Amino acid sequence: MNEKAIHNEYDLLIGEMNRMFVTDDAAELEVIHDYAKKRIDRIYEYHFGRLNNK
């Protein structure tokens, strides 16, 4: 994953968090939560790799 892709993951994560505030559907909230956790894991892995490759 490159820097542009990780910034896209960040933008999508922000959008998912915003959607959590407005949804009134428990099933949708669960799906959004799952995607948000995957995105934050990808962001973490990218930066962990970046820091360990110095």
Image (cartoon, rainbow, N blue to C red):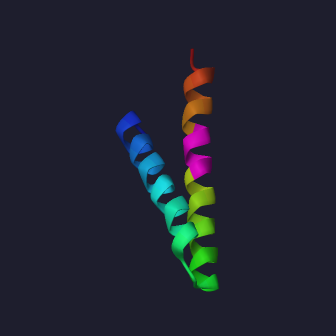
Hey, which residue is sitting farthest top in the picture? 54
Hey, which residue is sitting farthest front in the picture? 22
Q: Main secondary structure of the magenta part?
A: helix
Q: Relative to 15, does residue 48 appear above or below in the rendering?
A: above
Which residue is located at x 62 percent, y 67 percent?
34
Q: Relative to 11, does residue 22 appear above or below in the rendering?
A: below
Hey, which residue is sitting farthest left in the picture? 4
Residue 26's quadrant in the figure? bottom right
Q: Relative to 27, does residue 53 appear above or below in the rendering?
A: above
Report the front residue among 48 and 28.
Answer: 28
Q: Quadrant of the C terminus?
A: top right
Image coords of residue 13 (percent x, y): 50, 54
Image coords of residue 37 (percent x, y): 63, 58
Residue 32's quadrant in the figure? bottom right
Asked whether 14 falls inside the magenta stretch, the response is no
Asked whether 42 falls inside the magenta stretch, the response is yes
Q: Which residues, given as a range, are shown in magenta? A: 40-45
